[in-house]
């Protein structure tokens, strides 16, 4: 579970992370880099697609500066993945709630901006 988030830092199961990351049902993938820093693309989510979660929670950063194109959301939905896009300050709480409900959930979190 995610214990806390603040600008540039997230704590998951007692471990502090200071770079963007992906959380998959199989575990945390730290140091997540995107092809274009503040614009999410399908290739940035290859690991997520391989795991086929029910839901993907996307945290767009503290101020919400990471953009998630509508065509990407539509592609993920066509793959059967529900997509929730929120600022990271809300997204981590949504991720925890879905996890507590027993959902197969993944997350992609931008920690700054």
Image (cartoon, rainbow, N blue to C red):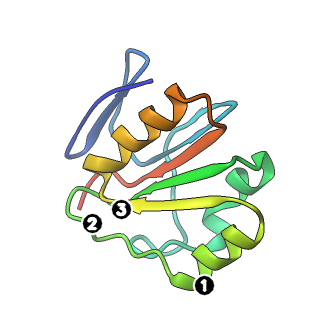
x%, y% of residue 90? 29, 48
Q: Does the residue at mark 3 contact the one at mark 2 (Cβ under 8 Å)? A: yes
Report the side of 63 relative to 111 (left or right).
left
Residue 39 screen position, x and y as percent: 45, 76
Q: CA distance from mark 3 to mark 2?
A: 5 Å
Task: List the residue tagged with mark 1.
Answer: 71
Which residue is at the far front? 101
Q: Which mark is residue 64?
A: 2
As measured in the structure, the alpha-carbon distance from the residue carrying label 3 to the one carrying label 1 is 16 Å
Q: What kind of element bears circle 1?
A: helix
Q: Nearer the viewer, residue 21 or 91?
A: 91
The numbered disc on residue 60 is 3
Work out whether mark 3 precedes mark 1 in sequence or the reverse, and give the earlier one. 3
Q: Is residue 25 above or below residue 91?
A: above
Residue 73 as seen in the image, left or right of residue 81 = left
* Residue 112 as seen in the image, left or right of residue 93: left
Q: Quadrant of the N terminus?
A: top left
Relative to 101, say whether 78 is above or below: below
């Amino acid at each position: 579970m995610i214990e806390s988030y603040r600008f540039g830092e997230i704590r998951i199961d007692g471990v502090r992370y200071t770079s963007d990351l992906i959380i998959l049902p199989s575990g945390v993938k730290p140091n997540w880099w995107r092809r274009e820093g503040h614009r999410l693309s399908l290739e940035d989510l290859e690991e997520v697609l391989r795991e086929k979660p029910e839901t993907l929670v996307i945290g767009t950063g503290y101020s919400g500066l990471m953009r998630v194109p509508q065509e990407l959301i539509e592609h993920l939905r066509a793959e059967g993945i529900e997509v929730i896009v929120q600022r990271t300050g809300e997204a981590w709480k949504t991720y925890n709630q879905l996890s507590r409900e027993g959902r197969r959930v993944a997350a992609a979190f931008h920690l700054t901006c």
